[in-house]
Image (cartoon, coloured by chain):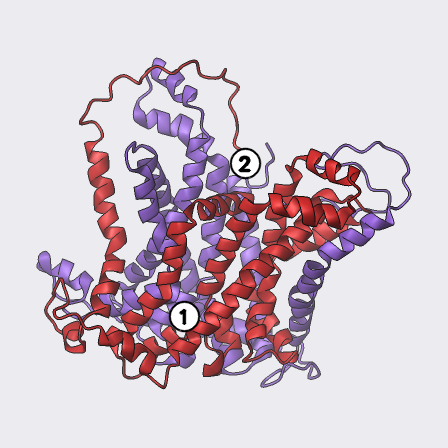
Chain colours: A purple, B red
Amino acid sequence: MAVSSPPATVPPRPRASAAPVKRRRRKVDWRAVGAFTVLTAPVVIGLGVFKYVAIAWSFLLSFNDARGTISIGHWIGFDNYAFLLGDSAFRDSLVVIALFTVFIVPVTFVASLGLAMLVNGIRRGRAFFRTVFLIPGAVSYVVAALVWKMALFNGLPSGVANVIGGLFGADPVPWLSETSPPVYWIAVVTLRLWLQVGLYMILFLAGLQAISPSLYEAGELDGTTKWQAFRYITLPQLRNTSVAVLLLILIGAFQAFDEFYNLFGTGLSGTATAPVKPPLVYLYDSALGDQNYGVGSAGAFLLTVIIVVITLLQGKFVGFGKKD
Amino acid sequence: MAVLTPEAPPAPARPVRPGRRGWGRAPKYALAGLLVLVFLMPFYIMVRNALMTRPQVSSPDWSWLPDPLSWVNFHDLFADPSVPMGHALLNSLVIAVITAPVGTMFGSMAGYALARIDVPGRRAVFTYVLVTLMIPQSVTFVPTFVVVGAMGGVNTTWGIIAPNLFSAFTVILFRNFYLRFPAEIEEAGRLDGLGYLGVYRRLVLPNSGSMLASLGALMFIESWNSFLWPLVIGQDPSSWTAQIALSTFLTAQTINLPALFAGALVTIAPLVAMFLVAQRFIVRGIAASGLKE
């Protein structure tokens, strides 16, 4: 994200983006200022209240003992942060999300790219296949969790996963409560994969269709194999798309809440099956369950820092932010 | 879309690629067909279970089709007094129907101003909007709860709607869209004596239809499917959305499973229908929003 330039001071310089303006001193056009203000006011005020004020308030709250209250006044310094870092449940939640990310990012990336190449290589009925792979994107995590928990991985002999396993002679597995080995990851990962892979496929499809066919023709003349064409033409041409997709998957993974909450019924809502609480579920439990808004706020800031750092690191790693 | 364009000359009338035999693509179609079955399977399960009787669903034996069809589940879904499903669906509808157009409108207004009205301080406003993108959306649920709670928005519909009307992301997408907007239209309007707001309302807005539709559709889907925020703010059953009601159903002590699946069907039906109808716009919206992040 290019937040590089400082806020402009009064004489605005012409920018490449705007229609070229002759460089001369201008009087302020008050009608333009008025229109600009009217048009931007809702967003400026809305973001001000629900982001800036909210975050500032919450930041202060994170240094307060704010149990059962959202008012500031009982200063306790870094105690909330110390509590979080000392709480093994919080540290466990970081491990959970790290593991989840390690599974979901490469799987989603490869699957969506593969799906895009498959659909792109199909002549007849391409729209049909694209639609089918995209449709799960309309389904909410709650509904998907319902189907996964109550039908696919319900652990009953008639659960779909067990029926399929039975075809190969496997015994029924209690998928969501089996922790050794932790097979519940299969349910968690496939759920998100089913929901999201079509959306990322669309991004890759757009990228693939922007590659000039002449590149492949030139390659064919040089006698490249299919793998070489993929490695030396397709992948480099998809670089921008790939970076965007990776980033989206990563950020999405770190914000996982819905499927964990509903699959494992943690927190306020019922019985835990496997002890799988990612950080947002932990935060939800401490802020809304225990009504401890100080710890909740501190957790929000720790998480934000972690996400921003990882995003920037990943950016460095894959070269995000390079302009071309 | 900043995809590198290779400096190759435009391809001359392309020869039909040699070497594509009639059967060459068969494995691709076979694989795609198999994947279609896999992708549609959860939908099939939903329909199947929604039409089964309770003993059938929990039977240890697998059966492909419900027999007889048990339509009563849809009745049970709305009859359960502990989970006000009908009311929850109505809440969801109200929320999405307000959030999508208003949120899209705010995004378009600010995006247009940031792209086309050159005033001192424009850059500052742009930065102000952009910075909020750095903060991961769902992490802000605690801060936003604190503010909305202080404003008395807990358990209210407006409390669920308000924070989602302002999306920095939508603003940025609209700004990019308006940067490429043909300037002639605006100039013509100005010659006819329209002010900035007049040009926006009479000329720019009517010509932004596809962008409004694509982001509106995405916002509608997002709003309809959102879970964490409505869960946080709507703790009282009267303010539950369809997703919350389903989730409560899902984690309840005794579950009427077929009714639960009927609920899932009812909840996804409007979105799947919308997806099929407005697919063109939705795909465009996804492509735009994905690549611009």
Residue at horizontal 49 percent and vertical 42 percent from the top:
A243
The image quarter containing residue B65 is bottom left
Name the front one of labels 2 and 1: 2
Secondary element at tag 2: loop
- What's the residue type where badge 2 is placed? Met
Q: Position of residue A58 (x, y in %)?
A: 64, 72
Spatial CA span between label 2 and label 1: 38 Å
Q: Name the quarter where the C terminus of chain A is drawn.
A: top right
Number of residue marks: 2
Badge 2 crowding class, 10 Å Cα cut-off, few under 14, some 14 to 19, many 20 or more, is few
Residue at horizontal 91 percent and vertical 43 percent from the top:
A27
Relative to residue A39, is residue A131 drawn left or right?
left
Q: Mark 2 points at which residue?
A: B1
Query: In the image, which disc is placed on residue A75?
Result: none
Residue A37 drawn above or below residue B140:
above
Q: Position of residue B23 (x, y in %)?
A: 17, 27
Q: Where is residue B159 in the image (x, y as percent from the top left)?
A: 58, 74
The image quarter containing residue B225 is bottom left
Secondary element at tag 1: loop
- What's the residue type where badge 1 is placed? Lys
Relative to residue A184, is residue B103 drawn left or right?
right
Residue A165 drawn above or below residue A26:
below
Q: Mark 1 points at which residue?
A: A277
Q: Nearer the viewer, residue A234 or A207?
A: A207
Residue A189 in view = yes
The image quarter containing residue A163 is bottom left
